[in-house]
Image: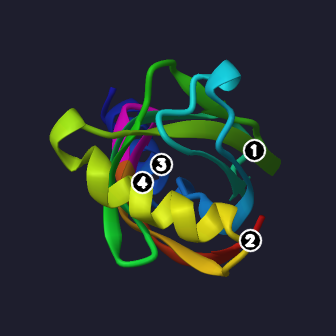
Amino acid sequence: MRIFSIVILGFLASSCSLYKPPEFKGIEDYSFSEDNGCNPICVELSFFNPNPYNIVLKSANVKGVLGKKDIGVLKISDSYVLKKSGISKINLSFSTEIKSFMPVVSGFFSYITGNEVILLIDGTLKVKALGVSKKIKINESLTVKY
């Protein structure tokens, strides 16, 4: 019985170190398409999961900035799974409140007229596997041009 308890404790202690956090690889693509539910913009993010099991994306606390104007926060409407031992791409949309829509329009105007605008996302994503939650830090910028 004592050996069984030691084996269980050893497994629990080692499982914490076996769970490696996924790596954020960057912004793959962006879209302003309302048909895809982008309000006002969607981004496709790429992650590498080094673990031999799937990881679930639980929540996001990520702010978006287009030009110098705040465009809102990333909204997670579905449960996303980061596939085991591979790269996963997920599409997320920014949720903009009506009161902040006017500053966003000025960023879109620069975009539509052909000027380069910087899209910046900054914050954390919460992921969970094996009952353990971890946070992934994201700070990425991308030049957006029409």
Image mark for residue 89: 1
The residues bearing labels 2 and 4 have C-alpha atoms spaced at a distance of 15 Å
Q: Which residue is disc 2 drawn over?
A: 145
Return the x and y of residue 104 as percentages of the image width and height. 38, 56
Query: Which tag, 2 or 4, sits closer to the chain's start?
Result: 4
Residue displayed at 74% across by 71% down: 145
- Asked which secondary structure carries label 1, the reply is strand
**Eye-nearest disc, 4 or 3:** 4
**Eye-nearest disc, 2 or 4:** 4
Return the x and y of residue 129 as percentages of the image width and height. 49, 36
| Start-end of magenta stretch | 126-133
Image mark for residue 44: none
Image mark for residue 15: 3
Query: Which tag, 2 or 1, sits closer to the chain's start?
Result: 1
Q: Which residue is disc 4 drawn over?
A: 105
Instruction: Specify the amino acid type for callout 2.
Output: Lys
Specify few, some or many for label 2: CA neighbours under 10 Å numbering under 14, 14-19, or 20 or more: few
Return the x and y of residue 59 as percentages of the image width and height. 35, 37
As drawn, the residue found furthest toward the right would be: 86
- Asked which secondary structure carries label 4, the reply is helix
